[in-house]
Each structure stands twice: as C-alpha cells, then as structure tokens.
Image (tube, grey):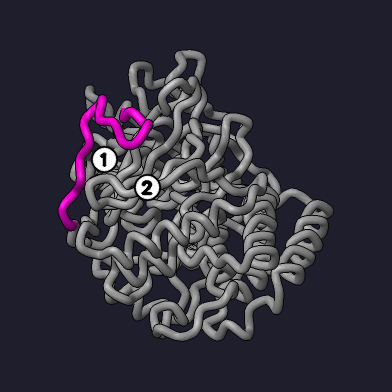
Amino acid sequence: MSYLIYTDTTGVKKIKLQKEDRISIGRSKANDLAFPGHGKISRKHTLIYYYPQKDSFVVADAGSTNGTLMNGNKVASPIILSDGDEIIVGDIRIRYSETDNIENVSKKIVDSFRTFSAEHLSEIETTKTVERLDEDKLGGPLQSYSYKLNLMQGTVIKNFSILRKLGMDDSASVYLARAEGEEKAVALKIFDKDMSDNIVGQEDFLSSFKKASSFQHISFVRYIDCGIHKGHPYYAMSYMPNVSLKIRIFKTAPLTELDAIDMISVIGTGLSYAFNQHGIIHCNLKPSNILFNSSDEIEISDYGFSEWASRHISGGVSAASPWYISPEQILGENISWHSDIYSLGIIFFQMLTGVLPFHSMEEEEILSMHIEEPFPMPNERNPNIKIHDETTEFIMRMTAKDPGKRFLSWSEFLNASQKLYEKLENYEIIEPFIPKKSAALLSSHTLTRSRIQKQKLK
C-alpha cells in the first residue's frame, strides 16, 4: 500500500492511496487535500495519481504559482514516486511512503518539520538558482558591497524626478523616474562609484552610451538619455513593468524545452543584430538583464557598457556576473561574441532545470568551476526533469570551454535552434519517469517486496 503523510497544526496525518484515486492538493476547499489560508499554496497546486503503465503513483504540478518540489528540486513533468520521496507544496511537506509501519516515517517528518517559507526557499534553493541582487534576499556568493548611493523620492537628476527605488546590484541602483512634462515613467540606472576625479571615465561612459543608443531593435530596451550626477554616471531607459527572467526562473522554472528554446532564439536574434550590425558584445548577459515589456515580449538591457565597466568600475577585470561569465573572460583572453553564447547557454540550462550548473558561496570557487569543472548534465542538477538528448547536446555546445567549439556564428546558432525547436515539436509528450536518484531506491524496495512475497509462499 501507499500513503501520503504530512504534518499540520494538529499533528501527523496519513492518507491511504488507492489506484482509482486522483488526489488534488491546493488552497481551495474543492481539493481532496485542502490547505485553506496557506498563501504560498495555489488554489490547485499539485496532483498525485496512479499510473497503470508503470504500476506506480505519480506527482505532477498543476500549474501552481510557486511550483511543486520533490526532494528539493522543482517538478517539471509527471514524476514516478518512490518510497521516502518528500513533496513540498507551498509551506507543507508531504512524505510518500510504501510501508504500513509509519511510526518512523512520522517521526522523521515531525523531527524535520518546520514552516517552509519563501525566505527558507531562498536560502536553500536560490544559492544555486539566481545571482545575488536586491540586498541579500536571493542568496548566492558573498560579495563585498561598496558605498551605495541612495536617492530620495523627489530628487531631480537633470530633468528626471525620482519616484522610487526598483532594485540594485553590486555597482549601481535602478530607480523609477519621470521626465518633466512626460506621462511615461522611465528606469534610471545610476552607478555608485563617484567619478568626479576621473574625467576619462566620464568621457568613456558618455561615448559608450552614444554607441549603444545609436540603434533601435525590438529585442533591446531603448536608451533615452545619460549624464553625470555629482560625479556618478547614469542613464535612463524604457521602464519594463513586468518582472525579469530572473524572477520568472525563480518562480516558474523548470520551463518546457520549447518555451526555453523560443526564448533563447529571441535573445540570440537581438544579440546577433547588435554584434553583426554594430559590433556590440553584451559581455554581462544574465537573467536580471532580460526584461519583459507590457506586451510580455523580451527586451535586453545593460548592453554596451561592459568594456567601460571593466576599465572604470571593476579595476580592469571583467564586470560580468560570476554565475554566467565565460572561461575566456575569467582568464582575461580576447573577448568575442562567443562569450555571449556561453552566458546564454547557462541561462538556457537554468530555464530547463531551475538551478545553475555551478554554485558555491565563494566567488573564486565558481570562477574556477567555469574553467576546470566539466559542465554538468541537466538531470544531474535536477533529477526531476527529463530532457531530450538533442537539447542536452545543444547546451553542451553552447557552453564548451573552448570558444572555438561553440557555434561558428550567430547565424549558425539561430538556424540550429530553429531546427531543434521543429524537431522537438514532433516528439511525443514525455511520459512519467523515475528520477535518476530515485531509480536505485525504487529497485531496492521492489527487491525487498519480492523477497517478502517469496517468504510468504514458503
């Protein structure tokens, strides 16, 4: 027999599963297992049902906002459950058990039980999922923060009036602002470093902005104006009201292969145009720089300033995020558009798995991993996903250590991504499967049950 065991405010609860059951779990009282009042649980969050083809029970996410986790990783497609698997639905932990004696299982749940919150999830999951931004909310390698320039509401910079702060990273802050006489708000990014005594740095900044703002493309955020405010370089750009890809990955990854390929194709089209038509390489591509406009279309931000930032902000080394930086950037070698392919490959990996390929609390260790560690297979980082071999091969080519072994041109990359998309469209839907880490466990339990049955026959 199979059971679902969980703990609520009244103690340990047990539900016996039948093959005809299709258990829905959610906040709404209409669910078979309802948790009303739990804000982190969607109205209909998770499904558990019997899969006769494999004579097993399966867990699947029901399109929830925060996702369903199994054994610490998000569930992307239906997963065959094995004895001892832990399912996390919002702030509720549920244990799947195939034994009648649940005392030990119950004790484990009680011992390990704690209220699971977004903050806890940030500490556990996003140290390997997203880059460090917005104070210390999302975890990641510890970085030393320089002096942060804080602008108060109503501060006027040129003709822009500050409305509120939107966020910050380790070198700049972004504010919502409005130009005098304009209805539309803009995003104003101002750098923390005071360059009052660095005239060359100021001139290089203005020159970089002029080049980056010289073209318009649907895949790039529009740059509006720039200047120097009390020694601090700043620029204004179109305000994107929707969340960035960073937040989408945090909330909804793993994404489907087709959705992820579609996104990297759009991003690649924009990067191809910037490089081939204007000679611009992004060099700091990351999910927080990939924004969505009011029509939910992708627009890339923070392009055109990598060389300036390296020279005048980060002391001559690359200013790229350690999670997405290419090996050649770390080693200080000649940078080409291949570096953007590498960064995009890591973003692609992250969209498909929900986690980053390399993670550590030490920045130097992450940089070393990019150079020395073999790039992991997607299901090594999240066993709850199943990705086609063609997609894995595509990721491995994007993230090759040697730039020459990546795609030969943006055109080749875009053609290959289109062919991959079309090929995957023709594949059948992936059936429920046993995660890599659970396969051996399930095998051992199957063997145990078999021995018990033989003993009974004797």
The numbered mark, 1 or 2, whose residue comes first in the sequence reads 1
Q: Is residue 258 left or right of residue 285?
A: right
Determine the residue positioned at 60% across, 44% down. 298
- At 50% from the left edge and 41% from the top edge, which residue is drawn? 224
Per the rendered image, the range of residues in magenta is: 146-162
Q: Position of residue 266 (x, y in %)?
A: 67, 52
Q: Is residue 60 magenta?
A: no
Q: Which residue is labeled 1 in the image? A: 119
Please give the name of the residue rendered at 27% of the width and 51% of the height, measured from the top-left corner. Answer: 232
Rendered position, 196 above or below 159: below
Mark pair 1, 2: CA separation: 38 Å
Q: Is residue 32 left or right of residue 174?
A: right
- Residue 116 in view, yes or no: yes
Nearer to the camera, 432 or 169: 169
Q: Residue 358: where, in percent of width, then height?
A: 40, 69
Q: What's the amino acid at mark 2?
A: Gly
Question: Is the Cβ of the residue at disc 1 closer than 8 Å to that at disc 2?
Answer: no
Find numbered disc 2 in the image and state the secondary structure of the residue it sits on.
Answer: strand
Q: Residue 377 sits in which quadrant?
A: bottom right
